[in-house]
Image (tube, coloured by chain):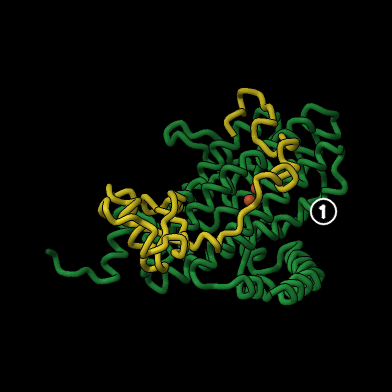
């Protein structure tokens, strides 16, 4: 028999063999912390992401669009819950995570700090923002932590509807009046670059990337995923007859990919640091909703105590 | 147990609690329900479950949960409990018919 393996060796062996790590397995502290950070921030993104679209539920142009948008926003709340639960298997609590979000210690996808100003924006968010999220989440189905990977599988099943309803909105606008086409183009103009930013900094500059890749928490790099998104989205924009706001965008025959221009990294840093158009509004809204709901949580507890 | 030792006489089985058994067949997959066992306690239930449900390497991890701890919805209430779901086809991707050129999303 071989000599008994250490915890570290067993863990490393599982990662090397592409096996999943499960909650009761030993894992390095750094792996646990890294996962709590990533999964909770992913959860926060789902929940904060409900706000820009949620504001349009009452203003949707038809009853059909209203029910669809309501269902989509409800799904995002569910995604937040799947992810908070996955993070909780690592020994953190909902209260700690919410506290980290509200105090600004934890981040969320900075795309949700941009305003959703028109019905065209609702279409662009479904098409582009959910589209980018899908590219990222498909990759994360292979992440090394079992509960996270399984949450991703569940989420990906629901995301396709989100992207298709968004594209369907765009398609309708683009088949409409000159004003409607202009609205669609304006939405693409404002959401294109923030969507590319969703994949994070270049690989060389990404603070957590290399360790996350080594631990197989991340399976593909930021730049790889961004390229994938661009390649699949350009033909979709062309089909709509819309112009992507990037003069450098062109097909590169040799690479077999689209070349595209550089992201405005200063803007990215500014929005991540909290200075985007809606950062304060998003957190204020979250705090308000959380406080407004306090009496419900209190009442549920009181009811439970009386019936114990 | 041998044939001349009738069961349920010295050791009344109904006193042993029932445990539901969940087996994870492979890392990365969910534990799935496979059946149940009677056992004296949870520790014992784990061993019985292993003996009964994983004799051919069906699993790498077993959970046992006291059946009485499981709270279940009533199938007779199914319609109002899960309603309204069937009338929301727009929750499904296929509801959005897109032209062939962009239908791969
Ligand atoms: Fe989502
Ligand atoms: Fe979504």
Please tell me how crowded label 1 is: few (under 14), some (14-19), or many (20+) other residues with Cα within 10 Å.
few
Tell which of A263 and A167 is nearer to you. Answer: A167
Q: Position of residue A83 (x, y in %)?
A: 57, 59
The hue in which chain B appears in the rendered picture of the protein: yellow
Tell which of A245 and B4 is nearer to you. Answer: B4
Quadrant for the N terminus of chain A in the image: bottom left
The image quadrant of residue A283 is bottom right
Count of marks, rendered view: 1
Residue shown at 68%/44% (left/top)?
B76
Residue shown at 76%/62% (left/top)?
A278
Q: Position of residue A204 (x, y in %)?
A: 44, 60
The hue in which chain A appears in the rendered picture of the protein: green
Is residue A268 shown left or right of residue B29?
A: right
Is residue B56 shown left or right of residue B68?
A: left
Quadrant for the C terminus of chain A in the image: bottom right
Element at badge 1?
loop
Is residue A132 shown left or right of residue A180?
A: left
The image quadrant of residue A126 is top right
- In this orientation, does residue B29 appear? yes
Residue shown at 22%/68% (left/top)?
A5
**CB of residue at label 1: within 8 Å of ligand 2?**
no
Q: Position of residue A303 (x, y in %)?
A: 76, 72
- In this orientation, does residue A205 appear? no
Residue occupying the far left of the picture: A1
Residue occupying the far top of the picture: B100
Residue that carries the numbered disc 1 in the rendered image = A55
Residue shown at 72%/33% (left/top)?
A168
Is residue A33 shown left or right of residue A265?
A: left
Identify whether A68 is placed above or below A45.
Answer: above
Q: The numbered mark 1 sits on a residue in which chain?
A: A
Identify whether B80 is placed above or below A87.
Answer: above
């Amino acid at each position: 028999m071989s000599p008994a393996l250490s915890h570290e060796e067993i863990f490393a062996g599982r990662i090397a063999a592409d096996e999943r790590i499960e909650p009761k397995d030993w894992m390095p502290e750094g792996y646990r912390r890294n996962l709590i950070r990533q999964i909770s921030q992913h959860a926060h993104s789902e929940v904060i992401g409900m706000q820009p679209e949620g504001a349009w539920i009452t203003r949707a142009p038809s009853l059909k669009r209203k029910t669809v948008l309501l269902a989509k926003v409800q799904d995002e709340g569910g995604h937040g819950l799947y992810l908070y639960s996955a993070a909780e298997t690592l020994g953190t609590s909902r209260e700690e995570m919410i506290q980290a979000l509200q105090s600004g210690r934890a981040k969320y996808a900075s795309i949700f700090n941009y305003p959703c100003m028109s019905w065209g924006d609702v279409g662009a968010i479904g098409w582009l923002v959910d589209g980018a999220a899908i590219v990222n989440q498909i990759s994360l189905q292979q992440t090394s932590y079992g509960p996270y990977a399984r949450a991703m599988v569940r989420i990906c099943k629901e995301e396709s509807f989100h992207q298709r309803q968004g594209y369907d909105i765009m398609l309708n606008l683009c088949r409409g009046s000159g004003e409607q086409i202009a609205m669609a183009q304006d939405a693409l103009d404002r959401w294109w670059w923030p969507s590319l930013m969703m994949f994070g900094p270049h690989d060389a500059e990404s603070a957590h990337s290399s360790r996350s890749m080594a631990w197989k928490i991340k399976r593909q790099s930021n730049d790889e995923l961004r390229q994938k998104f661009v390649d699949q989205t350009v033909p979709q924009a062309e089909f709509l007859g819309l112009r992507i706001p990037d003069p450098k965008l062109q097909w590169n025959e040799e690479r077999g990919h689209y070349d595209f221009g550089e992201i405005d990294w200063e803007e990215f840093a500014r929005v991540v640091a909290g200075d985007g158009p809606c950062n304060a509004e998003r957190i204020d809204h979250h705090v308000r909703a959380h406080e407004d709901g306090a009496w419900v949580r209190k009442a549920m507890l009181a009811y439970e105590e009386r019936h114990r | 147990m041998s044939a001349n030792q009738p069961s349920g006489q010295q050791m009344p089985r109904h006193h042993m609690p029932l445990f539901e058994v969940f087996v994870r067949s492979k890392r990365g997959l969910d534990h799935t329900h496979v059946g149940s066992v009677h056992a004296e306690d949870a520790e014992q239930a784990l061993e019985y479950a292993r003996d009964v449900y994983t004799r051919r390497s069906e699993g790498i991890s077993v959970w046992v949960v006291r059946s009485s701890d499981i709270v279940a919805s009533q199938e007779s209430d199914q319609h109002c409990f899960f309603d309204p779901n069937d009338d929301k086809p727009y929750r499904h991707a296929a509801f959005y018919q897109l032209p062939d050129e962009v239908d791969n999303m």
